[in-house]
Image (cartoon, coloured by chain):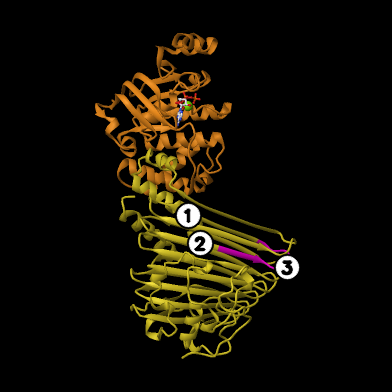
Amino acid sequence: MSKLEIKNLHVSVNTDQGPKQILRGVDLTISSGETHAVMGPNGSGKSTLAYSVAGHPKYEITDGEILLDGENVLEMSVDERARAGLFLAMQYPVEVPGVSVSNFLRTAKTAISGEAPALREWVGDLKTAMKNLRMDSDFTERNVNEGFSGGEKKRHEILQLELLKPKIAILDETDSGLDVDALKIVSEGVNRAKANTDLGVLLITHYTRILRYIQPDFVHVFVAGKVAEQGGPELAERLEAEGYDRYLKASA
Amino acid sequence: MAQHGIKEHSHGAGVPIQTRNERPRSTSIEDFAEVSKLQEIWRYLPIDKLKGLTQSVIGELADSHVTLNLASGVTANWVDTTAAQVGKAGLPEDRIAAIAWTNASKTLVIDVPKDLEQSQPSFVVIKPQSDQAMASHVLINVGTHAHATIVLDHAGLGVLGENVEIVLGDESTLNFVTIQDWDKGSTHVSTQFAKLGRNSNLRHTVVSLGGDLVRVTPAVELSSPGAEVNMYGVYLADSGNYFEHRPYVDHVAENCKSNVAYKGALQGVGAHTVWVGDVLIRETAVGTDSYELNRNLLLTAGARADSVPNLEIETGKIEGAGHASASGRFDDEQLFYLQARGLSETDAKKLVVRGFLSEIIQKIEIEEIEQRLIAAIELELERVGV
Ligand SMILES: Nc1ncnc2c1ncn2[C@@H]1O[C@H](COP(=O)(O)OP(=O)(O)OP(=O)(O)O)[C@@H](O)[C@H]1O
Ligand SMILES: [Mg+2]
């Protein structure tokens, strides 16, 4: 059983005009096996929340805490957080020229588990995971994210999720830009990870369609840097019908 | 033993040189002005690090400084530098090269006989183990239709003024690598000339890893139709390293191809690299296809990379000609992505540097050199907590 606790999180980003406050007191707790959907208008700070948990240096935590199983995440470096069991599937995965997917995945797996995986087993796991995600086997010889289509990048993120087996994963708009089939395939990947490793998921999305495949236990409405309302799956349906107007007026 | 000077055409010393083809060519020291920062060719150079290489009389590399490990069929022997076969690939265009030419009385000739197809690499290891200035001259002859791989490996301590000639017969191919992996305190000025026969193919790779001052100026003359050259360079410069690479492609004949790609990683205060890429496409070089590129990755503050591509085109009837040059810091987003997958900062940087240089490293196609380079990258990034 793992638990990620985000308490009263305040985050600012440095801009040319000085620091700009983005998160204004976020409270969220995600436990193993749970799926939390976070929905909210553009610019409300969803990616900022994801990056802050992962430890991106651009964001400054001005107040609050993040704990993973009671451990202070804010004191950990980016890689320590990953090794502690946090995973961020990025909204915009980065290209790494000259580094093949196969080399990258093996290096990451070695870093996370602290030892190089046994070769035979690793090759088998990789093959299976790629097959499940309907990824061509020649993908492993390509450079990380270089020339990948939007959908391929997202599949590649979920491939890493399945292979690295984190405790808690934040998926930042993993569903954006996916066609109907890809959405299903990617969702199945997340569900497999949940079933196999009791993964806790924080799923950032704009659309309810992914929630038909990945059942959320909780839905949080994110507005102007904090959670404005939370509820069950029915809240997502209501957001789709009504939009965020209600919250935006309230926060203005 | 000074030899009688060979001279092509001279504009007299001290005349400012405008275009590449107007530089004087001569083996006589007195045809060139003293080395000075006022001349473009020396403008970046830390002249105090040239050690004795600017003196008119210097020592000479001997047989005992050279270790040969030749693939079967490839031969080596020493001849007088006055022999007719010497000077066929090109002549010095600067004073230091003329000094080296004049002071090297013997030339080491590596012969790849015609029709030989040898996929095993031949190694020529040069280790002077001395801080005395020395001159050396190497000539590589690849016969018609022959295929070979030759590695010229410079290591240990040395102050070396060197001329390397490469002559490719018609339809031959050569994979040539020159490695500068000198100890601290070393200075190396290597002037390299290649002349390519009809439809021949040269891959010329410069690998610079160590030395206080390393200057490699490979000039390739494409004067027979259908010849192709790929000039690659990969370098890792640390504090205390000054590396200068000036590849030059002279397109004379029609339908020749050239591709120049150099990549370097720099770290530490005072690490300095200079890349000046010259491509000259002469009026006669109809159907030329040419491209040159230089990229530098600055791993820490305090390192400096100068990068200057020069392209002179005297005919419009070409297939293509282009250049690119860029120097930049580590991409923070790349490092974040890798660290978010569990890699330590150092491991993430290693992976990025390896990835950055891999495009060139893969081109070498000599397993042991690739491994050596990868090990050098590892070591380099371990050294400083970059
Ligand atoms: N470097 C920066 N400089 C200025 N503003 C920034 C910077 N980084 C983020 N912001 C701002 O912070 C706010 C929150 O951005 P964030 O990316 O977290 O939003 P989001 O909720 O993920 O939006 P989307 O739904 O469009 O992905 C936005 O207004 C954004 O412009
Ligand atoms: Mg976002």
Q: Is residue B289 left or right of residue A16?
A: right
State the residue position of label 2: B275
What SS does tag 1 mark? strand
Foreground of the two, B379 or A215: B379
Bin the neighbour count of mark 1 within 10 Å (Cα to Cα): few under 14, some 14-19, many 20 and up: many
| Residue B371 inside the magenta-drawn segment | no
Q: Earlier in the sequence, mark 1 or mark 2?
A: 2
Foreground of the two, B189 or A26: B189
Which image quadrant for residue B49?
bottom left
Q: Position of residue A45 (x, y in %)?
A: 43, 23
Q: Which chain is yellow?
A: B
Amino acid on which the number 3 mark rests in the picture: Glu
Chain letter, disc 2 residue: B
State the residue position of label 1: B296
Q: Earlier in the sequence, mark 1 or mark 3?
A: 3
Marks 1 and 2 on same chain = yes
Amino acid on which the number 1 mark rests in the picture: Asn
Q: Which chain is orange?
A: A
Region rendered in magenta: B277-289
Does residue B118 appear anywhere in the picture? Answer: no
Q: Is mark 1 within 8 Å of ligand 1?
A: no
Can you tell which mark lies on residue B283?
3
Which image quadrant for residue B289?
bottom right
Foreground of the two, B107 or B366: B107
Mark 1 and mark 2 residues within 8 Å of each other at the beta carbon: yes
**Farthest residue toward the left?**
A70
Q: Is mark 3 within 8 Å of ligand 1?
A: no
Bin the neighbour count of mark 3 within 10 Å (Cα to Cα): few under 14, some 14-19, many 20 and up: some
